[in-house]
Image (tube, rainbow, N blue to C red):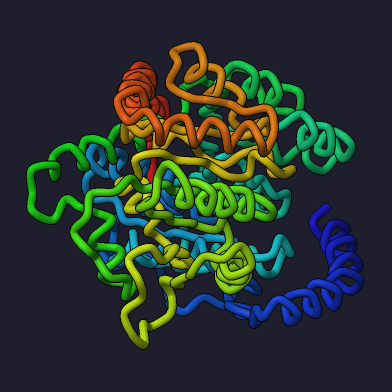
Amino acid sequence: MSAALDLIYVAGLSIAGPILGVSALRKGRSPDGIGERFGVLPFRRARREPGARLLWIHAVSVGEVNIARAFASAFLEENPGWELAVSTGTGTGRERARRVFPDDRVFYFPLDLGPCVRSSWGRVRPDLVVLVELEVWPNFMETARAARVPVVVVNGRITERTARRYRMFGGIFGRAFAALARVCAQNEEYAARFRTVGVPAERIAVTGNVKYDMSTASATAAAAEADSPDADRWAELAAASGIATDGRAAPVLVAGSTGSPEERVVLELARRLRAGPVPHLRVIVVPRHVERGEEVASVCRDVGLTPVRRSARPASTAPADAVLVLDTIGELVAAYEAADVVFVGGSLNDRGGQNMLEPAGLGKPVVVGPNTRNFRESVGHLLAREGLIQARDAAGVGEALAGLLADPQGAAAMGRRARAAIDELRGATRRTVASLAPLVRAPAAA
């Protein structure tokens, strides 16, 4: 089956490869890690200590890497002595992984061509493989089966559309899913879908969403720093970006993980508020894709605001009312910590929403748009506890944000309800690690 699958892959790559390459060049992206994707890794072996057991974690992009970090911390606490190797699928994910796993091997996940997978596997030689959320590939699973190494999915989620696509190729992907040793699903809905694509029911456990634990951990850290003289996150970010800090107390509006046209919605609102009830409003915009920094800055200028890109070295000091465009990786939480009110993007376009759990866990009042299908359960939980506002359209988002900024006490109370709602759902990381204990106790790979 591997040879036949490789032929299909090669045919697909011959058609799609040039198109994807041209698209990447047009967007200013250069090819990265080509050798690693073909299984040529920058190390001879992943283990640093002879005889050590090794966990291979695969996390596609930044969000999954953050989950991997939380999981790995809990796993190593329960299983000291294991070493880590971490693969990613995107450049931003790889950059984030290098930051949060500085002492571990970080590399690109191989293309699912038999020779590429076997080459990567020969260098890593794991005792256990953890796939964050999904990422099940047929040749990879066949290689794991041959090596008798268990592969598990943690924080598992699968949409109905994705499950339907897998079922269309049931002969190939059904065998791959059937080879999973364990799936730790976020909820019963996802667990049911994993069963439909071929995972044996007895190998599926509902352990909850690790992101709730991540949000709570961030909130705890923020609270611990609350009395420190460096607790003013806006001042820190502004000073580091070349924005003047005039010492005036002013509310901070953060738009996180945004895409087009969400930046324009928030920035036009900011301009109106500054011209009226909130003249000293500070604004931070964090685009979902950092390469859109200049595009977002251009929108700022279009609506009459002064942008400062975090990624640019300040040539001179910008005015205190400049909009901070946070086009860097790994600073979204810092922005949320600085916020008085938060809008979470991906919810006014067709992205299905971005992670609102982080700001909610930090005790921030959060507004989202109508399109939050990727976080349906989380949104429902927060709405039921009045810890979130979901607007029906862009105008509604503007009204909700303006209302919260006009009522600081009400906004703070909503933030407290959001944090309490997140606290109710803690424990997924601990349950996930416990669920994998029988596999951890299994004999080491040869």
Left-right relation of 384 to 289: left
214 sits left or right of 183 in the view: left
* Residue lying at 78% horizontally and 35% vertically, measured from the top left: 174
Q: For this rendering, which residue is in front, 164 or 418?
A: 418
Q: How many marks?
A: 0
Residue 165, placed above or below residue 108: above
User: Where residue 243 sits in the image (x, y, percent)?
Assistant: 32, 71
Question: Percent x, y for residue 389?
Answer: 52, 25
Instruction: Please indicate whether residue 115 sits to the left or right of residue 22 in the image.
Output: left
Residue 305 sits above or below residue 218 on the image: below
Can residue 291 be seen? Answer: no
Residue at point 38% right, 19% down?
Answer: 421
Which residue corresponds to the image point at 48% horizontal and 70% vertical from the top-left? 306
Is 376 or 338 nearer to us in this picture? 338
Residue at (69, 65) in percent of width and height:
111
- Closer to us: 54 or 318: 318
Q: Residue furthest front?
A: 276
